[in-house]
Amino acid sequence: MEMMFIMIAGMTTTNQRTVRPGVGTSTRNPAAAEAVFLDVTRRLLAPLRISDGDIAVDVGPGAGSATVAMAAAVGPRGRVYAVDLDPAMLDATMAAAREAGVAERVLPVAHDLEEGAPPLPEPVDAIWSSACLHHTLDWEASVRALASALRPGGTLCVAEGGLPTRCLPWDAGVGLPGLEIRLDEAHNRWSTQWFAGRTGARRQRRGWTEVLRAAGLVEVTSVTELLDLPAPVSDQVRTVVIEELAARVARATPFLDENDRATWELLLDPTGAHWLGHRADLGLLTARTAYLGRTPR
């Protein structure tokens, strides 16, 4: 059992729970991945218009890069609640906040969205959640729960989805052309099986904008930001790209054909001649989409 805690306004309580399977980061070093996407994250945060003295929430903070950016925006008079069910992610977020000198503005809250709205002691001005809500059993219920935590005029921003990532040429010179396209298809089959295989999972039958409207939010819109890091990429980006591809391949392997499995084994083998780390044509091109709306005043 993991020891969980809730820290709100200086009060700490403890309870024991087990982190649900199927949640968490894709790679061993989420901070490195977040650093590569940080500019895009900041641009997606901008429509929240977080300002000095605001009360904000980061749901599923990962390694804390968005939490730190939000803490900088709220200033010394504001605060940011970091909400996660994984104590390791809360620890990582607080470490990032301490390193950035904003830890006094960040309050960790251990909470599972399956249990409803986070137990916050006050209505909040802004809620940000990135690549988190799709882990919940009922996405619409999760959006309703988060919307209920907003003050009148408060804004919810949910970053989910975007466009498929492309890192390799269409013909990588190994295996059949279109390797990443087939990886997308296999990973989608894995995702579908994973989601539907959980007891109580409820399929979302409408888009995120309609989900936000159904939760009572108004002025609902979306924004998409491009990340284009052309080849040759830096060593930092190359490492992140290879780790992200390895994570996707590991999940999708049961749905890849034998030829593609063998090709990915060659590309991901750091001792082999075809290792992705040796390539000068490795890039990173993708787009992330965020959906946002506010509560009526």
Image (tube, rainbow, N blue to C red):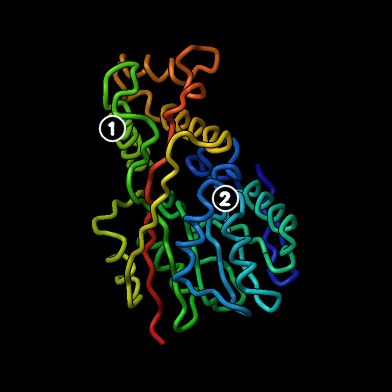
Quadrant housing residue 110: bottom right
Distance between the Cα atoms at labels 1 and 2? 27 Å
* Residue lying at 38% horizontally and 24% vertically, measured from the top left: 253
Q: Residue at x 45, y 62 (%)?
A: 44
Residue 7 in the image: state x and y as whole percent.
Answer: 70, 64
246 vs 271, nearest the viewer: 271
Q: Which mark is residue 62?
A: 2
Percent across and percent down for residue 77 are 69, 79
Type of amino acid at the residue the image marks with label 1: Ile
Q: In the image, which is nearer the foreground, mark 1 or mark 2?
A: 1
Residue 198: assigned label: none
Q: Is residue 33 left or right of residue 274?
A: right
Which mark identifies residue 181?
1
Element at label 1: helix
Quadrant where the N terminus sits is top right
Residue 148: name its quadrant. bottom left
Residue count near mark 2 (Cα–Cα under 10 Å), binned few <14, some 14–19, many ≥20: many
Residue drawn at (71%, 58%) of the image: 100
